[in-house]
């Protein structure tokens, strides 16, 4: 499932992967042509979304809890 924003309907839709018409790899990341439930073809860009997402923080170190009992 993925959320798309249809500019013709002016609202987001939750659609399944079967709504993906085609996917293409571009220099700016993958893009997909997705058909909204009303039948409009929308262009979904994944690269910009991923680039705009904040970087995940560093993993928590567990060394403080891993003392070996002597
Ligand atoms: Zn639509």
Image (tube, rainbow, N blue to C red):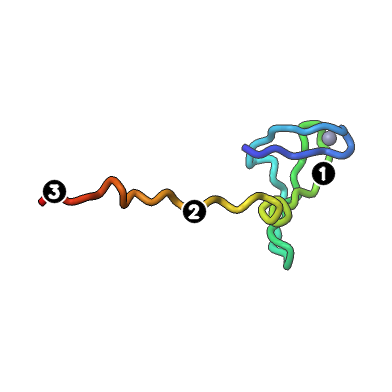
State the quadrant of the N terminus.
top right
Label for residue 58? 2
Residue to which mark 3 is pinned: 69
**What whole-number distance in Å separates the C-alpha atoms at marks 3 and 2?**
28 Å
- Residue at x 71%, y 50% (from the top left corner): 49
Of callouts 3 and 1, the N-terminal one: 1
Name the mark nearer the viewer: 2 or 1.
2
Image spot of residue 67 (x, y percent): 22, 50
Secondary element at image label 1: strand
**What whole-number distance in Å separates the C-alpha atoms at marks 3 and 1?**
63 Å
Image spot of residue 50 (x, y percent): 66, 53
- Residue at x 87%, y 39% (from the top left corner): 7
Q: Evaluate whether residue 37 shows in this view.
A: yes
Please indicate whether residue 57 sits to the left or right of residue 30 in the image.
left
Label for residue 41? 1
Name the mark nearer the viewer: 3 or 1.
3
- Residue at x 64%, y 37% (from the top left corner): 16
């Amino acid at each position: 499932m993925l959320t798309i924003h249809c500019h013709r309907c002016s609202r987001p839709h939750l659609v399944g992967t079967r709504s993906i018409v085609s996917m293409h790899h571009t220099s700016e990341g993958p893009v997909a042509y997705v058909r909204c439930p009303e039948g409009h073809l929308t262009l979904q860009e994944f690269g910009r979304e991923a680039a705009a997402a904040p970087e995940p923080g560093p993993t928590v170190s567990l060394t403080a809890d891993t003392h070996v009992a002597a």
